[in-house]
Amino acid sequence: MAKFWREDIETMSSEDMRALQSERLRKQVRHVYDNVPYYRNMMDNKGVAPDDIQSVDDLKKLPFLSKADLREAYPYGLLAVPLTDCVRIHSTSGTTGKRVVAFYTQHDVDLWEDCCARAITAAGGGADDVVQVAYGYGLFTGGAGLHGGSHKVGSLTLPMSSGNTERQIQFIQDLGATVLCCTPSYAAYIGETIHDMGLSPDDLQLKAGIFGAEPWTEEMRRSIEKSLGIKAYDIYGLTEISGPGVAFECCEQKGMHINEDHFIAEIIDPETGEVLPDGTVGELVFTSITKEAFPLLRYRTRDLCVLTRGKCACGRTLVKMAKPMGRSDDMMIIRGVNVFQSQIETVLIEQGYSPNYLIEVDRVNNTDTLDISVEMTAEQFSDKMKDLQDTERELASAITAMLGIRPKVHLVSPKTIARSEGKAVRVIDRRKLHD
Ligand code: DLL
């Protein structure tokens, strides 16, 4: 079984990679300057000419692009080729505002699918596999990206899209799916439904899952791996930069390799914009150096994470990004304390709860409130009803130890929290609604 999809690239020396990136960056800056008036103005305003960018070291001279710029330029303002050269559009899920539309030439689609093929290969997928794609198809990039990657590696592709969970399970069983691609929250839901249907992982041939599109914790990974009897691989990407496959996990499961022959990654201080050294937490910024239709230079993802370099035990040399901790604008400040959903999820799963919970933040009498509804499993429901309040208090204390502020915990009956077939919404911040 092939270990790499593009061994030459995936194991390239860092000097060769830098040279390749620099060469592609020079061309890309020229392409963007010549063809995108919006970006040319930004560069002119900053006093940067295309010839000032000779290598990756010069990247910091370029201005940043933000989501606000993309919205302002909607829909065609950042298009770098004639519309007639484009063959596809995709669009962001629009959970945080107006949608962004991204354009692709055939070349862009090919490169993107190649990135997804690398991810599937790294997860052990190949021509003998049956890949069930249960990410949504449509404007969302999840379905199309993994679908294209699965074709490339020659797997039998089941284009299920998300939803209709019992049919998903029937196909996993009847058609012997070996690789499942969907969001981690949907994987957890599929695992739960398999259990409810009286099936066990031994009844399935699944061996791997490629899960991404939303933050998920290591605890969630272990819980999904157990419920589906698989190895669960993380995959990262965003519509603006292409879609899934910007970065993917290998068998080491210690961070995701960034396809840096296509996307140069930087970490910056989200407040000052200063470039931070490897190993420091900050905002991830990408420059796409091979895209034709919608090439973004120094795009601020708002995702917070850490980069690490060095050869991985899997043999890859591609720079790694840690699991994103969430978006910088998803960080909740509650009573002055920074809180991430992932911290709460870690405690809940460690304490034996399922990943079905809802975090509600509000402000009452000028004080922030934090309420966490946590669903009990059927077994917990019967033994914990007796001492419900004690259990709620214990759980609140465990979360307080993690966060430094005390939440109110509400244990709720099994199956009362809505399940997700795509990206889960587990935080409702009502303070934003009042503002
Ligand atoms: O979610 C692309 C994708 C599809 C990735 C399928 C992986 C699998 P968007 O809808 O544009 O694109 O959302 C992008 O989702 O900026 C992150 O905040 C978040 N995200 C994506 N993958 C991960 C991940 C797709 N593995 C936004 N872990 C990104 C954490 C992720 N967050």
Image (cartoon, rainbow, N blue to C red):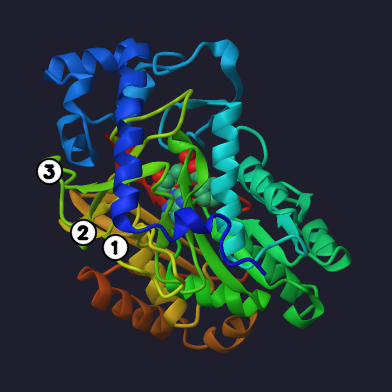
Q: Which label was assigned to residue 278?
A: 2
Secondary structure type for disc 3: loop
Above or below residue 80? Residue 167 is below
User: Which of the 4 quarters of the picture holds residue 311?
Assistant: bottom left
Disc 2 versus disc 3: distance between alpha carbons? 13 Å
User: Which of the 4 quarters of the picture holds residue 130?
Assistant: bottom right
Do callouts 2 and 1 mark residues in contact (Cβ within 8 Å)?
yes
Residue 45 shown left or right of residue 32 in the figure: left
Residue 301 shows up from this direction: no
Of labels 1 and 3, earlier in sequence is: 3
Secondary structure type for disc 2: loop
Residue 321 shown left or right of residue 270 in the figure: right
| Residue of label 1 | 309
Return the x and y of residue 10 as percentages of the image width and height: 46, 57
Above or below residue 247? Residue 356 is below
Above or below residue 261? Residue 195 is below
Above or below residue 80? Residue 274 is below
Disc 2 versus disc 1: distance between alpha carbons? 8 Å
Residue 378 shows up from this direction: yes
Q: Three-letter amino acid code at disc 2?
A: Asp
395 and 251: which is toward the camera: 251
Residue depicted at 39% across the width and 85% down the height = 390
224 and 198: which is toward the camera: 224
Q: Which label was assigned to residue 89?
A: none
